[in-house]
Image (cartoon, rainbow, N blue to C red):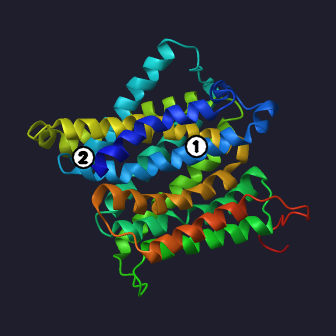
């Protein structure tokens, strides 16, 4: 009963986000100065993306009982592509890519979803989900360096302190009380590859949002991603897929992954990157393992004790602190000249 209620709530999420955006059409427009004023809608957008991505861990587990990881990723991206192209058929939100930007889109899709999802999927077969969540949560610690060096985004002391506090809260949530941490080196290495892939993706998306709307970026990255994953699916898992037990439960959860995880979540997150900047948007990634712990409690019956509750409070405190503005001079240099 608890699982049904939480799953049903995921369908209500996009409707709530649409209602709270003063003008949701901004998602389908290149960046403009008037968009910056809609900060409430921006934060709702990013948080919605984090909720959807948190739920993908549960949905993936369910589908993985029936299909292999390459099958899941390919079907997820392919279905998302069909949905997004269907939407563009009835609207003019999908823009044509300029010939000079084709290589950028190819590199973007190669980094994410291709490299990221391969590294994350294989890495999680070698280490626990909690250990993987801790490693993935280091993304916001690396993004400020790339954002400062490549995008000239300001880095303040509050940004840095907030990120560190938030990361500490993530460790409290996902680790045991004795803070034991045992993991296979190969698994850690694969998850670190996923981390740097996500960082590279965020850097590239920030540049592309200056010329294209987030719907266009999400659609083309999924088209290219589907093409890249097709050979892996055909070579390694196609025969297994044909002989698998196809259930409504698996198909429905693949639908969740496609609609929410690979479509709406990316549109909402890229909208946040466009307005908030790469660093401020990526800090929200820290709440993914926290939300996953909450969803696991309701949907899988896992324990949610005082330690996890305390860790959630720490993460949210760091997240709030990192978003505060200060009148002091920005801490523009991560390394003293």
Residue 127: image quadrant is bottom left
Q: Which residue lies furthest to the top in this view?
A: 90
Give coordinates of residue 160: x percent, y percent. Answer: 72, 68
Residue at x-position 34% and y-position 45%: 5
| Residue 212 higher or lower than 182, as above or below | above
Q: Which mark is residue 130?
A: none
Q: 10 Å neighbourhood of mark 1: few (<14), some, or many (≥20)?
A: many
Q: In this view, does 155 lie to the left or right of 294?
A: right
Asked whether residue 232 is in view, the answer is no
Q: In this view, does 102 lie to the left or right of 150?
A: left
Residue at x-position 48% and y-position 49%: 51
Quarter of the rendering occupied by the C terminus:
bottom right
Mark 2 vs mark 1, CA separation in Å: 24 Å
Give coordinates of residue 102: x percent, y percent. Answer: 57, 30
**Residue to which mark 2 is pinned:** 63
**Element marked by disc 1:** helix
Q: 10 Å neighbourhood of mark 2: few (<14), some, or many (≥20)?
A: many
Q: How many labels does the image show?
A: 2
**Element marked by disc 2:** helix
Residue 26: image quadrant is top right
**Residue to which mark 1 is pinned:** 269
Give coordinates of residue 336: x percent, y percent. Answer: 83, 75
Relative depth, front residue between 122 and 268: 268
Tell me whether circle 2 and circle 1 mark residues in contact (CB < 8 Å). Answer: no
Q: Residue furthest front?
A: 1
Asked whether residue 119 is in view, the answer is yes
| Residue 161 higher or lower than 261, as above or below | below
Q: In this view, does 11 lie to the left or right of 14?
A: left
Residue 259: image quadrant is top left
Relative depth, front residue between 227 and 137: 137
Residue at x-position 21% and y-position 42%: 235
């Amino acid at each position: 009963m608890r699982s049904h209620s939480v799953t049903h709530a995921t369908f209500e999420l996009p409707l709530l986000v649409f209602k709270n955006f003063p003008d949701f059409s901004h998602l389908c427009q290149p960046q403009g100065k008037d968009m910056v004023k809609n900060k409430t809608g921006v934060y709702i957008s990013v948080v919605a993306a984090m909720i959807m991505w948190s739920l993908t861990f549960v949905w993936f587990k369910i589908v993985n009982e029936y299909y292999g990881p390459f099958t899941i990723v390919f079907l997820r991206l392919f279905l998302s592509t069909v949905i997004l192209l269907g939407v563009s058929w009835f609207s003019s939100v999908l823009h044509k890519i300029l010939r000079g930007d084709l290589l950028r889109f190819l590199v973007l899709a190669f980094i994410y979803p291709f490299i990221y999802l391969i590294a994350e999927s294989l890495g999680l077969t070698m280490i626990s989900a909690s250990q993987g969540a801790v490693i993935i949560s280091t993304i916001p610690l690396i993004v400020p360096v790339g954002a400062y060096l490549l995008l000239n985004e300001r880095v303040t002391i509050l940004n840095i302190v907030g990120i560190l506090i938030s990361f500490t809260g993530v460790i409290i949530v996902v680790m045991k009380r004795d803070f034991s941490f045992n993991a296979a080196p190969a698994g850690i290495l694969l998850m670190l590859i996923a981390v740097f892939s996500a960082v590279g993706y965020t850097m590239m998306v920030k540049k592309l949002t200056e010329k294209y709307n987030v719907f266009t970026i999400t659609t083309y990255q999924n088209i290219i991603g589907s093409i890249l994953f097709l050979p892996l699916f055909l070579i390694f898992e196609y025969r297994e897929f044909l002989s698998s037990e196809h259930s409504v439960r698996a198909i429905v959860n693949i639908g969740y992954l496609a609609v929410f995880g690979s479509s709406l979540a990316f549109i909402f997150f890229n909208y946040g990157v466009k307005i908030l900047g790469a660093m401020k948007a990526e800090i929200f990634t820290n709440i993914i393992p926290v939300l996953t712990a909450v969803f696991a409690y309701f949907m899988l019956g896992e324990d949610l004790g005082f330690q996890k509750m305390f860790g959630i409070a720490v993460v949210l405190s760091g997240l709030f602190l990192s978003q505060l503005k200060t009148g002091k001079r920005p801490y523009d240099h991560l390394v003293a000249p």
